[in-house]
Image (cartoon, grey):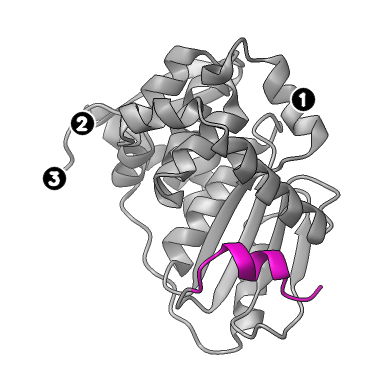
Amino acid sequence: MKHSNVISLFLEPVEHQIEIYYFFDPFHKDALKMEAIVNKLLLEYGDYVRINKILAPSLRVLTKCQAQSTSKIDNIALAYKAAEVQGRNRARKFMRYLFNRISPSNSVCTKEHIIDSATLANLDIHSFMEEMESENLHTLLNRDLALYRELDINLLPTFVFFSGDIESEGLKIEGVNEYFIYSYVIHELLDIDIQKKALPHIYEYIKKNELVSIDELKIIYDWQDSVLQKELKQLQLSQYISSVTHGDEIYFEAIGNHV
């Protein structure tokens, strides 16, 4: 898979040595697991990679977005593109906050969820609401569709890796895989000694991401279960975090200021 003309046309060049295109389905049962993997890649390899997170513009995904919405303002696909206009990092934060509101309790996305998530992601709400009504969003979705087709995406989620060499082949990894697979690909593509960044304190990670499952923490920190449980218990006893249960899953949220 050669470096796409669509990529070259629509995405500005960057200094990062690896460009990653991550196509995701917000309704996928492993969406939050993949969110954890993307977060860890950015935490450890942020100096070497840029991840372009793209809500897959497939008919199946867009139909789901349309089916669960009653208007433009609660359509996840349109909301994500509107957020992206204000920057990819803010859009990524927006989607994380939205996941926190709809995934744990299997809720239907609402206007309130959208506005709340946009506010927490520090979006300009006035501009965001104007963009939600703009026909420009359909142009942006069509751009994503062109990229989706050119990269021949057939399964979600999918990562497509490109090294800094524009003439080199892209590497596609489909489906849900363990973290070490993506990490291995980065090391192989760079073919140089790289130093991973240290992970943040577990409290800082929980605080930044608002609501975090124990499964996500296992992916991020890769600790023995007993060590993770001990750390979480300590933070709870110190009243830095609290736990909440949704279905069979335990989540943690920050309630204090860690020193």
Q: Residue at x 58, y 31 (%)?
A: 78
| Circles 3, 1 touching at the beta carbon (< 8 Å) | no
Left/right of residue 153 with respect to residue 248 in the rendered view: right
Whether 23 is among the magenta residues is no
- Quarter of the picture holding the N terminus: bottom right
Q: Residue at x 69, y 45 (%)?
A: 142
Left/right of residue 1 with respect to residue 124 in the rendered view: right
| Circles 2, 3 touching at the beta carbon (< 8 Å) | no
Between 33 and 141, the one lying in front of the other is 141
Q: CA distance from mark 2 to mark 3?
A: 11 Å
What x and y, as percent, mark residue 35?
A: 56, 44
Q: Amino acid at mark 2?
A: Ser
User: Which residue is situated farthest in the front direction here?
Assistant: 135
Q: Amino acid at mark 3?
A: Val
Q: Which residue is mark 3?
A: 259
Q: Which residue is mark 2?
A: 238
Identify the mark nearer the N-term, 3 or 1.
1
What x and y, as percent, mark residue 205?
A: 35, 45
Between 86 and 47, the one lying in front of the other is 86
Left/right of residue 79 with respect to residue 177 in the rendered view: left
Span colored in magenta = 1-13
Please, is residue 233 above or below residue 68 in the view?
below
Identify the mark nearer the N-term, 2 or 3.
2
Whether 8 is among the magenta residues is yes
Within 10 angstroms of label 2, few (less than 14), some, or many (20 or more) residues?
A: few
Q: Which mark is residue 63?
A: 1
Q: Nearer the viewer, mark 1 or mark 2?
A: 1
Please, is residue 2 above or below residue 255 in the view?
below
Observer able to see residue 211 = no
- Quarter of the picture holding the C terminus: top left
Between 259 and 192, the one lying in front of the other is 192
